[in-house]
Image: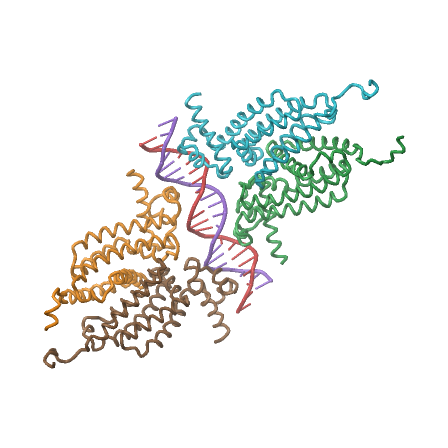
Chain colours: A brown, B orange, C cyan, D green, E purple, F red
Amino acid sequence: MTQRSSARERILRAAILALSSHGYAGTTARSIAALGGFAPGVIYYHFADLDEVFTATAAYTSELREERYRAALAGVTKAVPLIRALRTLYAEDLESGHIEAVQELVAAARPGSPLAAAMAAQTRQWELLAEEILARLLRGKPLGRLVNVPTAARAAVAYYLGMQTLTHIDGDASRPEAAFAQAARLAAAFDKLPALRRRPRPSRRS
Amino acid sequence: MTQRSSARERILRAAILALSSHGYAGTTARSIAALGGFAPGVIYYHFADLDEVFTATAAYTSELREERYRAALAGVTKAVPLIRALRTLYAEDLESGHIEAVQELVAAARPGSPLAAAMAAQTRQWELLAEEILARLLRGKPLGRLVNVPTAARAAVAYYLGMQTLTHIDGDASRPEAAFAQAARLAAAFDKLPALRRRPRPSRRS
Amino acid sequence: MTQRSSARERILRAAILALSSHGYAGTTARSIAALGGFAPGVIYYHFADLDEVFTATAAYTSELREERYRAALAGVTKAVPLIRALRTLYAEDLESGHIEAVQELVAAARPGSPLAAAMAAQTRQWELLAEEILARLLRGKPLGRLVNVPTAARAAVAYYLGMQTLTHIDGDASRPEAAFAQAARLAAAFDKLPALRRRPRPSRRS
Amino acid sequence: MTQRSSARERILRAAILALSSHGYAGTTARSIAALGGFAPGVIYYHFADLDEVFTATAAYTSELREERYRAALAGVTKAVPLIRALRTLYAEDLESGHIEAVQELVAAARPGSPLAAAMAAQTRQWELLAEEILARLLRGKPLGRLVNVPTAARAAVAYYLGMQTLTHIDGDASRPEAAFAQAARLAAAFDKLPALRRRPRPSRRS
DNA sequence: AATGAATGAGTCTTCATTCAT
DNA sequence: TATGAATGAAGACTCATTCAT
């Protein structure tokens, strides 16, 4: 990494920090600079304006996290280990502040704005990742016939986002935990569902 | 009395309008006043500050919609008509601007703020409503054994919120439609699941 | 008193209350009305504007107190009982809020303003009262030759005002008490000074 | 460093100007900026809010003047030269606007406010200065036995403040002059009072 | 006489952004 | 590259005052 890119990154990291600790409205040039330990003017040397900082932050945090998610979920084909992995990843998200930063950016994005476009591109990436995993999971399962994978993937992303939002407003950290516990139970049941077979009358066999 | 309540309501209606058309950040005393056709000062005659306007707006829009939802979902006990009803209600939400207003308020609420408390109270109401309906739906179904109703109800609310958020940022109205279509398919399958039986013996035998 | 005058007085009493409890800046039409238990509009029925309320309040409180002072100091010709009486009057002033109201009005009066004129007129009255008493006190005393009564009277009023101001900013109620104690000591000494005689050598006589 | 301190000082000087010419109520961010020839925003770059400007102004003007007073009164041990020096200092105070600024700040300070605390601290300094001088003056004088120095010092400060206040509301500049003339007469008499010492050469007398 | 809703001007304050150094 | 002072355009909010009832 060159000097310039590291300066850019310092700003982006400071922006994530600012977003997660002060919220979007509290993320001003001054608050970013204060958290990053540099002068406000620096921001304008590396970015045209704050909007650009926000879109860049969105891309930055998303890439970082997606890389991690892909690595952790690479070989997963069953629901139970999937849920287990997601639980860990969620904890990481939470602790790193990324989850709050994304939450704030998504919330602040006005429809049609460049930030909204950036966030839409990012969530699209997450939908694609969810599609891959879902496809793997449903392969050969009877439920697969009922489910349109892209739609379900989007639902999964939507749910994830919404859960964050609810946690954000009521601060009840036990709710995501309960959700993961519930998901684990459903996952166990799901993994026990028999795989799909060619013949429509399995009773004959037995 | 009519005068007083109508002045307050005029402000709240203008606030909903402002939230849905300009977003939270764009909902200033001036923009509310402009949309409502009154002087900015009026707002401060009826409310202590904008925060109070926002929390009141949250309560106002939530009550209005919940009433409508309860009426429309009163007798529903099957998944198919439930999804059908929700589709209609969603269309109403969308057209009225309520959905956008809530989206903006939820998004803008800082954790721990009075607005967050108000929004948490409101979403709690929606969770309760979802619980009632889910309980009705799962009664006697084998799936009911796997599912914790409050957790599932919260998931439903989270999903609804998240779906709005995604639509908000990518403006793709076809996605909720696809989601409803998918939900309809699942609902049909769900309604066909055999109900649970009282008698534990015959099942054992066969 | 007619109805009208009692309404006026209700306003003036509320204004004194507001001045002493909220200060000049906090004495708004609304705060006066709230303290008096009437609608803000009433004020403008009886007075042209708030300035008029303030000048009327100055006159009202001054008259009330001056009456009381004159009554209490009528027959006083010696320093010791004078100080004793002033001590009591000061306690009354303090408790009634009049002292704070005057303090605020004096402080708020811009040079050249109608309020300043009103306050100047009022303080002039107090100077005249002080002159009367001082003249009585100094009659026949050798100190009388050194002292110009009007100037000393003004000094007394100035001192009284300034002492209030100091107490106002540091809230130390023990200071006026200490001042009265000191004054009492000086008064005792003063009363013991021999009265003036024609001849400079009384010793000769004896 | 020079830059920074000069920017702060420019603001403080403008604040003194604004206070002395427009009064406390008229000393707004705008009026300060207009008088100082800078944008209102500058004020908030150097101070958190106007209150901080006011307390800083109080400290600034007080320090400036106290320095001057201490210098001018350093060697003074007699009443006559003291009064003469005070007369000059008062004229300076008047002309510089400091006296008006202090008057406005003292008057505007609400009991218990930070400004009141600042003003109380300042007046305390003046009381200490007065104590020093009074102690020097009374040393060896019989009057010293009757007078509690701190109380008398406070009385002196109170009188000074009150005299300013009276001048402020009636604009009669001849009054302070008359007061100084009167004070000069008393000072002359005071300086002629015999010192307290037992043995100023008793042998001569006998 | 009284009410209380409404207005509009003015205040403090915040910030993105610029720019001289 | 970096700094940090300065600017100007808002925004929230307050309040004297008016006016229809």
Hey, which residue is sitting farthest front in the picture?
Answer: B201
Q: Does the image show residue D22?
A: no
Does A120 sit left or right of B66 as displayed? right
- Quadrant containing the N terminus of chain C is top left
In the figure, C50 relative to B21: above or below?
above
Does B42 sit left or right of D199 as displayed? left
**Measuring 62% from the left and 58% from the top, which residue is drawn there?**
D1
User: In this orientation, which residue lies closer to the viewer: C138 or B170?
Assistant: C138
Image coordinates for residue D80, horizontal then vertical, percent: 76, 35
User: In this orientation, which residue lies closer to the viewer: A201 or B184?
Assistant: A201
Does C139 sit left or right of B155 as displayed? right
In the figure, C72 relative to A29: above or below?
above
Image coordinates for residue C9, horizontal then vertical, percent: 46, 27
Hey, which residue is sitting farthest bottom in the picture?
Answer: A205
**Looking at the image, how many numbered discs can be counted on the residues?**
0
**Measuring 53% from the left and 25% from the top, which residue is drawn there?**
C64
Image quadrant where residue A104 sits: bottom left
Image coordinates for residue A16, horizontal then vertical, percent: 43, 65
User: In this orientation, which residue lies closer to the viewer: B95 or B110?
Assistant: B110
Image coordinates for residue A133, horizontal then vertical, percent: 28, 75
- Quadrant containing the C terminus of chain C is top right
Image quadrant where residue A163 sits: bottom left
User: In this orientation, which residue lies closer to the viewer: C138 or B183?
Assistant: C138
